Image (cartoon, rainbow, N blue to C red):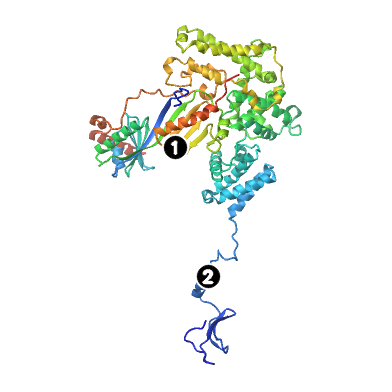
């Protein structure tokens, strides 16, 4: 964070999305029959399986691709994914845990000051966009990090990025710009 | 060139050439002119296909006509410009934008609906570039399209064409919006009519007030404009006739589309006015209700700066008296400097307040939002809100954690007033991804064979009972 200001911002990670493959075909009806906490969705061709301990929900396709959502950290996502693979193994499939990758991380952060959105968009013209008729927040896309930050006028930020490091860097990147557009102290 | 191997029967020369006599192919001797052999007058199909060198579409006979949808689109752009009475230059710019965007691969194969919307978006972008105030909602009404679709197409178009279209501020929108209201004496009864100029002025002041009280930022502009114009109309002549009008009837009378959100904004704005009206000294502390506040709006707006300061100071006093009650908590707060901002605030607000009713400057004449920068209602009180949250809530930043402490500041953004109760962060146990997985844990996720049998039986039983019906 900013060494000069000594401001510690709490970035709370709310969701981590990860994918992995099982390298074998999965029979969705067997999983739906023999698994607990399983929802079968034939119209989408997938099965939803929810785990309790790392609180994650997984979408399982018959091709063996699995998307795991709901974890609050990258390690938790991996733990949930491995538990899932183990469960499928126990159900009788020849599962091999492979190609695990964290795809998306969603985090929220709160600034201790309010922000003037119109000035913020003016200063960062093409990168930031603010359409109050469409969405109450200004959107700031950082191409190099592939991260998107949504800035609300109350000072809350919502950050999405490919991994936790990118999210932290994005907050550091945007903090000085927000600082210069904060709502002023009264005279 | 001579055809090889043929000899003219007349003169015997070998110089036989191919000739076309009125498109009838002939073999003619170059020396004596005798016709050696003739072809058919008509061509066979194979000759035709082999004979043509140039494709029909590429030949100069056929001009490349612009696609019919493009023509329709350009007509639509022109029509929109005429409805909105834009200048000729703007019409040209909009057309250019449309042509460029239409030809772009992102838009050439898109559905017809999107192409229609694209026309509207080009007009919108042009207006913004020339600082002509127009809201997206207006385009939405004119095209009768889904606002989300308009948003998507607009953002894509701006990205593709790389144009800079600065969005219009809400004050600029106000004037154009006001002109849409048919309230002149020829349209409505004399009692209910109002000139556009007066209406705009009064509504502009109300809008500034709303902006300070966090009612404008992040919200759709049109409902707020409608609400402020309605309240301005009612307050300019608060007779019984006008007060009886609801927002819906007003919109009907002024021939303006009504929105479902505008009534909420009216309520919010009235609340703000009530809070300020409470401070009017000649009321001597009487209750100000949303019904009675309209008559006082005139006074409130004229002296609004003073009233704001007084409202803030009285609110701070109320807070200070609250915080005196739990003395132990106060001592444990990070330094008693938290009280000094309150006192400072009170002191600074009292001194100007004491100078007798400082010049009631014609505030309603100015229409700029920048004027309100001096009295900021929110920042300091949001800051003050922070130290008051106890030491235990360090993990939750900035937002007052308990819903009861929402009354910290006088005017709060709605997201803070009705704060989402955040799921309490469970202290995270150190997790690495590669731990051992116990069998018992996994078994809890798998049904036992008995359970499977039960489940299948139950499903069959349900299915059969369904069949019965």
Q: Quadrant of residue A70?
A: top left
Q: Which residue is mark 1?
A: A145
Task: Determine whether the residue tagged by mark 1 lies in a helix, strand or loop.
Answer: loop
Residue B413 percent coordinates (x, y): 54, 24
Residue B314 seen in the current view: no
Vertical order, B190 against B150 (above or below): above
**Which residue corresponds to the image point at 61% horizontal and 53% vertical from the top-left?**
B71
In front here: B152 or B346? B346
Direction from residue B283 to residue A124 in the image, left or right: left
Which quarter of the rendered picture does the C terminus of chain B lie within?
A: top left
Residue B186 at x, y = what percent?
Answer: 76, 34
The image position of residue A33, as x and y in percent, is 29, 38
Residue nearest the observer in this picture, B267 or A89: A89
**Rendered position, A81 above or below B49:** above
Q: Is residue B249 left or right of residue A118?
A: right
Tell me if residue B158 can be seen: yes
Q: Numbered disc 2: what chain? A: B
Front in this rendered view, residue A112 or B273: A112
Q: Which residue is mark 2?
A: B53
- Which quadrant holds residue B359? top right
Q: Under tag 2, what secondary structure?
A: loop
- How many numbered discs sit on the rendered protein? 2
Q: Position of residue B360 (x, y in %)?
A: 71, 18
10 Å neighbourhood of mark 2: few (<14), some, or many (≥20)?
Answer: few
Q: Which of the two marks, 2 or 1, is nearer to us in this view?
A: 1
């Amino acid at each position: 964070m900013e060494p000069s200001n000594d401001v510690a911002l709490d970035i709370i990670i709310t969701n981590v999305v990860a994918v992995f493959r099982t390298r074998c075909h999965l029979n969705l009806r067997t999983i739906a029959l023999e698994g607990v906490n399983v929802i079968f969705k034939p119209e989408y061709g997938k099965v939803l399986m929810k785990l309790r301990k790392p609180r994650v929900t997984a979408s399982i396709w018959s091709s063996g691709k699995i998307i795991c959502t709901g974890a609050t950290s990258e390690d938790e996502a991996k733990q949930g994914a491995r538990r899932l693979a183990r469960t499928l193994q126990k159900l009788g499939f020849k599962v091999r845990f492979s190609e695990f990758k964290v795809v998306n991380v969603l985090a929220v952060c709160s600034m201790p000051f309010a922000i003037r959105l119109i000035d913020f968009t003016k200063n960062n013209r093409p990168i930031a966009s603010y359409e109050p008729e469409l969405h109450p927040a200004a959107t700031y896309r950082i191409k190099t990090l592939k991260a998107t930050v949504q800035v609300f006028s109350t000072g809350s930020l919502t950050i999405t990025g490919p991994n936790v490091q990118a999210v932290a860097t994005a907050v550091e990147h945007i903090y000085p710009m927000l600082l210069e557009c904060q709502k002023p102290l009264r005279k | 060139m001579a055809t090889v191997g043929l000899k003219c029967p007349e003169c015997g020369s070998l110089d036989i050439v191919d000739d076309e006599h009125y498109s009838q192919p002939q073999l003619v001797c170059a020396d004596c002119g005798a016709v050696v052999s003739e072809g058919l007058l008509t061509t066979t199909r194979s000759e035709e296909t082999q004979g043509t060198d140039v494709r029909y579409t590429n030949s100069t006979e056929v001009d490349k006509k612009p696609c019919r949808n493009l023509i329709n689109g350009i007509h639509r752009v022109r029509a929109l410009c005429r409805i909105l009475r834009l200048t000729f230059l703007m019409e040209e710019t909009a057309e250019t934008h449309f042509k460029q965007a239409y030809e772009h691969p992102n838009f050439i194969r898109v559905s017809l609906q999107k192409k229609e919307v694209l026309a509207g978006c080009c007009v919108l972008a042009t207006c913004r570039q020339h600082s002509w105030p127009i809201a997206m909602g207006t385009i939405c009404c004119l095209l009768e399209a889904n606002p989300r679709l308009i948003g998507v197409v607009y953002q894509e178009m701006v990205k593709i064409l790389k144009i800079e279209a600065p969005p219009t501020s809400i004050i600029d929108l106000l004037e154009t919006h006001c002109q849409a209201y048919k309230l002149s004496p020829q349209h409505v009864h004399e009692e209910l009519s109002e000139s556009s100029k007066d209406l705009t002025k009064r509504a502009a002041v109300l809008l500034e007030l709303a902006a300070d009280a966090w009612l404008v930022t992040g919200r759709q502009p049109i409902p707020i404009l409608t609400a402020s114009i309605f309240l301005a109309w009612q307050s300019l002549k608060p007779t019984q006739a006008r007060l009886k009008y609801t927002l819906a009837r007003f919109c009907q009378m002024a021939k303006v589309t009504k929105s479902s959100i505008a009534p909420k904004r009216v309520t919010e704005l009235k609340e703000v006015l009530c809070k300020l009206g409470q401070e009017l000294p000649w009321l001597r502390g009487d209750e100000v209700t949303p019904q009675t506040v309209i008559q006082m709006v005139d006074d409130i707006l004229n002296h609004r700066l003073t009233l704001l300061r007084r409202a803030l100071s009285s609110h701070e006093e109320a807070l200070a008296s609250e915080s005196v009650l739990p003395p132990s908590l106060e001592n444990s707060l990070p330094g008693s400097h938290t009280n000094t901002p309150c006192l400072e605030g009170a002191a600074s607000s009292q001194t100007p307040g004491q100078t007798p009713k400082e010049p009631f400057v014609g505030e309603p004449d100015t229409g700029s939002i920048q004027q309100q920068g001096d009295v900021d209602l929110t920042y300091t009180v949001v800051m003050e809100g922070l130290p008051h949250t106890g030491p235990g809530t360090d993990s939750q930043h900035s937002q007052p954690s308990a819903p009861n402490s929402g009354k910290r500041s006088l005017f709060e953004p709605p997201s803070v007033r009705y704060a989402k109760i955040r799921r309490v962060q469970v202290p995270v146990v150190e997790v690495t991804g590669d731990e051992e997985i116990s069998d018992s844990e996994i078994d809890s996720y798998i049904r036992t064979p008995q359970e499977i049998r039960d489940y299948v039986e139950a499903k069959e039983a349900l299915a059969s009972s369904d069949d019965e019906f």
